[in-house]
Image: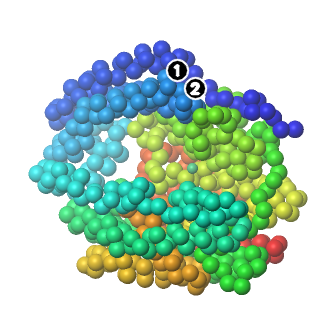
């Protein structure tokens, strides 16, 4: 029996503010708090007590601002057509911009404290709760230039970021890709529809979409090569000015991740390409193709799982999936459902997609549009993983260390997805469902670990070339990208794939994508470890959830049993992929 939409839970954001009037009352305090914090300007040198008070004033302002923002954006996302809610959101965003100068002085002044003052502060009991943050400031200091140099770089920043803007304007606004016929209807090819067409069962649709897309990029490849070349050069120059050993080291500095973690990821994937080749071969067989091409990798191998799930089914399945995480986790998660952290009903005007969002002083809320599909059950598990991570970190860390880093952001959510996958596999006798699940996960691992590592390898290659002084021309980029693509998939098909680099916005993000691959690898390693080893692995995992950013992210993960300084976790995740491929080979 499928529940009606009105029986799905609606989130309780009145727990943040019972009314718009209550929000207004807090909103009116914001400016005064910003001024209080700004009054410490120029005084950080005075004493450890003054610095502690300044940090406290900053925290009071930030916490209120975040709470105001969370309420405003959740309410606005419930119904994007709600004028009152969207004006509230505009006002809080406007206040952030207007009040930014009241806090902009803080980091530069802190960072510029004389060594002997900083040393005193690091030993001060009054600042003991902030020692790690201060150490991070000191660590970063060796790469900060003189005030005059920083000023020049700051003034030029708008100019040096012009190629990024050119790329996104060209890519998102100016380029068009034409039309194609899909199911007898003329459709426009856009970035969004491209992905839908690539998943189409009719190969002609996939092929046409792929060719039209990449022919368009091919025509502009010299322009795209020049924007990418300029951005990579900026990374290289900036790393040199700031005395980093390489542009890669500069990009990994914030997370304090050694370069070997990055290069080892690439090495591990290289050592596990055979399962990928087998998966490509399997696709070719199941799709009954003489020759497989790159546009045959995205369409689902098996028809969608048509089974329908009620909200209660979904909750029960996720409860079952997270059972191996133990009593404490299970209890809090069940309470999350009861306490209505989740907004599940699809409704007109609601923001599409799904997210987990909150702050230190609110519950970690979840927005989704539950439509009774298996995919929605996975979404609940995924967003639930994010929210539980936030809950644990917020409850076990002080405000300053409660936020976890982007590096760790997708680990808890993906761990829950893997647990749900294993739970469904272990408790279902439905062969079709199992085959569907296996295909689905294989595709996810292909896109998240293999494909993102290929991107990461390309990024590293072009930065190294730029460091040697080699200009990144369209020919060079085409050639190198084509070679990598052939290496990762062993598909020797349509040559147009060599222009794909031109349309990937992530290449402008400065060594970002490898985190997707390490994150999913860690999640697979954690979930399978918990299922295999029980209690000790589970306790270590809860330690990770509770750690926020109280240490370097690699150290936190090491404590959880995932040591990314060794090849072991990524190797284990790729072996898991090989196991899925083997199972599929036997089933299909
Ligand atoms: Zn996520």
Could you say which quadrant of the image residue 302 lies in?
Answer: bottom right
**Percent coordinates x, y for residue 46 in the rendering:** 16, 32
**Percent coordinates x, y for residue 485 in the rendering:** 52, 78
Q: Quadrant of the C terminus?
A: bottom right
Query: CA gap, disc 1 to disc 2?
Result: 7 Å
Q: Residues within 10 Å of mark 1 (few under 14, many from 20)?
A: some
Residue at 67% over, 63% down: 182
* Residue 244 visible in the picture: no
- 188 or 456: nearer the viewer: 188
**Percent coordinates x, y for residue 330 in the rendering:** 70, 40
Could you say which quadrant of the image residue 297 lies in?
Answer: bottom right
Q: Is residue 154 left or right of residue 286?
A: left
Tell me the element at label 1.
loop
Check whether the beta carbons of the residues at disc 1 and disc 2 lie within 8 A of each other: yes
The disc label shown at residue 414, or none:
none
Question: As drawn, which residue projects farthest toward the left?
Answer: 148
Total marks drawn? 2
| 321 relative to 210, above or below | above
The disc label shown at residue 17, or none:
1
* Residue 233 visible in the picture: yes
Tell me the element at label 2.
helix
Q: Residues within 10 Å of mark 2 (few under 14, many from 20)?
A: many
Residue at 52% over, 68% down: 213
Residue at 33% over, 59% down: 166
Is ligand 1 less than 8 Å from the beta carbon at label 1?
no
**Percent coordinates x, y for residue 509 in the rendering:** 39, 59
Is ligand 1 less than 8 Å from the beta carbon at label 2?
no
| 219 relative to 435, above or below | below
- 161 or 143: nearer the viewer: 161
The disc label shown at residue 13, or none:
2
Residue at 63% over, 54% down: 415
| 496 relative to 61, above or below | below
């Amino acid at each position: 029996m499928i529940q009606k939409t009105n029986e799905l839970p609606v989130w309780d954001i009145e727990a943040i503010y019972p009314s718009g009037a209550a929000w207004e009352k807090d909103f009116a305090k914001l400016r005064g708090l910003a001024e209080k914090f700004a009054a410490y300007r120029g005084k950080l040198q005075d004493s450890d007590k003054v610095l502690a008070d300044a940090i406290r004033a900053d925290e009071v302002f930030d916490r209120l601002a975040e709470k105001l923002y969370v309420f405003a954006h959740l309410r606005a996302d419930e119904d994007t057509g709600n004028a009152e809610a969207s004006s509230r959101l505009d006002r809080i965003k406007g206040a952030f911009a207007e009040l930014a100068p009241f806090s902009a002085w803080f980091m530069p002044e802190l960072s510029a404290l004389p060594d002997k003052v900083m040393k005193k502060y690091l030993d001060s009991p009054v600042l003991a709760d902030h020692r790690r943050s201060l150490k991070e400031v000191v660590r970063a200091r060796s790469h900060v230039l003189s005030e005059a140099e920083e000023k020049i770089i700051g003034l030029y920043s708008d100019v040096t970021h012009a190629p990024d803007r050119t790329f996104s304007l060209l890519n998102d606004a100016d380029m068009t890709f034409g039309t194609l016929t899909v199911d007898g209807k003329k459709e426009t090819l856009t970035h969004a529809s491209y992905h839908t067409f690539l998943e189409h069962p009719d190969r002609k649709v996939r092929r046409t979409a792929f060719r039209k897309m990449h022919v368009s990029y091919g025509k502009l490849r010299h322009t795209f090569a020049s924007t990418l070349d300029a951005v990579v050069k900026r990374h290289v120059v900036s790393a040199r000015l700031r005395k980093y050993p390489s542009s890669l080291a500069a990009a990994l500095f914030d997370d304090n991740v050694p370069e070997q973690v990055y290069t080892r990821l690439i090495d591990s994937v290289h050592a596990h390409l055979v399962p990928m080749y087998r998966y490509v071969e399997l696709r070719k067989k199941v799709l009954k193709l003489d020759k497989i091409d790159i546009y045959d990798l995205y369409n689902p191998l098996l028809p969608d799982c048509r089974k329908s799930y009620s909200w209660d089914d979904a909750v029960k399945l996720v409860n079952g999936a997270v059972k191996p995480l133990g009593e404490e986790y299970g209890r809090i998660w069940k309470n999350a459902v009861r306490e209505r952290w989740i907004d599940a009903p699809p409704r007109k005007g609601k923001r599409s997609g799904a997210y987990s969002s909150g702050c230190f002083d609110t519950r970690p809320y979840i927005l989704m549009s539950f439509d009774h599909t298996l995919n929605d059950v996975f979404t609940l598990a995924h967003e639930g993983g994010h929210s539980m991570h936030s809950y644990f970190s917020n409850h076990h860390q002080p405000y300053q260390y409660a936020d976890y880093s982007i590096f760790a952001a997708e680990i808890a959510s993906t761990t829950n997805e893997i647990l749900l996958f294993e739970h469904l596999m272990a408790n279902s006798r439905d062969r079709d469902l199992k085959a569907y699940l296996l295909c689905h996960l294989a595709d996810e691992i292909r896109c998240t670990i293999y494909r993102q590592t290929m991107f990461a390898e390309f990024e590293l290659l072009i930065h190294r070339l730029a460091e040697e002084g080699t200009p990144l021309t369209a020919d060079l980029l085409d050639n190198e990208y084509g070679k990598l693509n052939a290496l990762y998939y062993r598909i020797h098909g349509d040559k147009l794939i060599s222009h794909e680099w031109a349309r990937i916005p992530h290449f402008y993000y400065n060594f970002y994508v490898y985190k997707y691959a390490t994150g999913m690898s860690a999640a697979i390693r954690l979930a399978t470890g918990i299922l295999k080893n029980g209690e000790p692995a589970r306790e270590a995992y809860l330690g990770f959830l509770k750690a926020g950013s109280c240490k370097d992210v690699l150290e936190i993960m090491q404590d959880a049993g995932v040591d990314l300084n060794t090849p072991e976790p990524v190797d284990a995740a790729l072996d898991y992929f090989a196991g899925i491929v083997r199972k599929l080979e036997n089933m299909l």
